[in-house]
Amino acid sequence: MTTQLQDAYIVAATRTPIGKSGRGYFRNTRPDDLLVKVLQSALAQVPDLDPALVEDAIVGCSFPEGAQGLNLARMGVLLAGLPNTIGGVTINRYCASGITAVAMAADRIRVGQADVMIAAGVESMSMVPMMGNNPSMNMAILKDENVGMAYGMGLTAEKVAEQWKISREAQDAFALQSHQRALAAQAAGYFDAETTPVEIIERVPNLATGQIDLKTRIVNRDEGARPDTSLEGLAKLKPVFAAKGSVTAGNSSQTSDGAGALILVSEKILKQFNLTPLARFASFAVRGVPPEIMGIGPKVAIPAACKAAGITQDQIDWFELNEAFAAQSLAVVQDLGLDPAKVNPMGGAIALGHPLGATGAIRSATTIHALHRNNLKYGMVTMCVGTGMGAAGIFERV
């Protein structure tokens, strides 16, 4: 188990709905505005806590440039109207940025260097696309020993599907299950407690008057899940990344926009402000794997996180395993012998979307609220990470 001075507790965990990138309801919403919304919402959930006690805000973002550049974390703190005494740092571990932010915030508390921290994640793939606006790579990655770094994420999924013998049929069935579970959870209202509604202002030119008409609406539901998804429809989709491959748009995660935020405190603060903890942050682990099979990353991160928490894999009641691709998710489940009923019971990124650096924070909120709703003890957020990594964080309901 990890040695520490004190525990870190989560007292608030929330997220925005997840929008489709490029054509969804957040396509014209700035990522810093999404971040502001969740920061304000998270703090509003603990009204008795003095925000001036927050030391730092650690915010994950996969491509912190353009609209989500300029040290997004500090900008978000100030734009949210929080005390200017709160610091802000933006971190990047690609798809694990959000859960890494949570782990780093927890660590500051666990080693006694802080009592109140904010952890968050945000990504607008509408405004900053995959690879960023001006990608530039070292040509040395094209050498044989480094070439895995040059693979696109989809090609790594094809490599995993081939090596782990994950069939196209199995991938499509997994994708369908993701949509079915997500739709069932939405219908049951299971996402409501974790979701902060967002008001969207749309500006539409009125050609008759020459004016700009403003239309407002409130969004409170992830827009990726599709009721019309079927095995027949998925089977018709062509492979995207390899001519004779099995990875399609239908069995891959959706590109998305969204944000999530958590408030973490020490036991001293819990008692001082009479706060009710939602969960204790139990452990975090990150491990590297060959870049060309990056999707298998959780296979090595999950056991490491369990060891650090002093528990076994079988004690995890709820897994949020990011569905970057059905192929890699199935390979991880297969190799670790995970119980499929415990893995993404409310669907995953194939149906709900994957806003890269925000996903870890978003799914942390999902996990924590699911533990309470179902009276479970341990939950895990885990994902594969570009260039060959796996990350996993464990929460314990208290």
Image (spheres, rainbow, N blue to C red):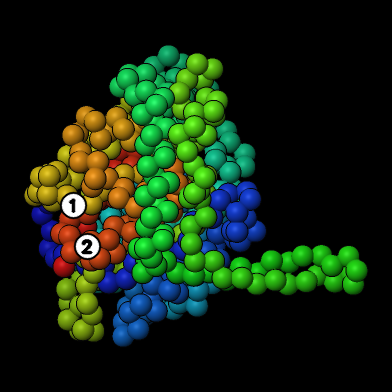
Please, what secondary structure does the residue beneath circle 2 have?
Answer: loop
Closer to viewer: mark 1 or mark 2:
2
Please, what secondary structure does the residue beneath circle 1 have?
Answer: loop
CA distance for labels 1 and 2: 10 Å
Q: Quadrant of residue 211?
A: bottom right
7 lies left or right of 35:
left
Earlier residue among tags 1 and 2? 1
| Residue 341 drawn above or below residue 17 | above
All told, the count of numbered labels is 2
Q: Which mark is residue 129?
A: none
Q: Residue at x 38, y 55 (%)?
A: 184
Local packing at callout 1 (Cα closer than 10 Å; few below 14, some 14-19, many 20+) is: some
The answer to whether one can see residue 82 in this image is yes
Contact (Cβ within 8 Å) of mark 1 with mark 2:
yes
Q: Nearer the viewer, residue 310 or 269?
A: 310
Q: Quadrant of residue 5?
A: bottom left
Residue 127 in percent (x, y) is at: 61, 51
Q: Nearer the viewer, residue 181 or 97?
A: 181
295 lies left or right of 240:
left
Q: Residue at x 19, y 34 (%)?
A: 336
Q: Nearer the viewer, residue 364 or 93?
A: 364
The answer to whether one can see residue 50 in this image is no
Q: Quadrant of the C terminus?
A: bottom left
Q: Quadrant of residue 175?
A: top left
Which residue is identified by label 2?
374
| Residue 21 drawn above or below residue 244 | below
Of the residues shown, which amino acid type is indicated by label 1? Asp
Residue 92 in percent (x, y) is at: 42, 47
Q: Which mark is residue 317?
A: 1
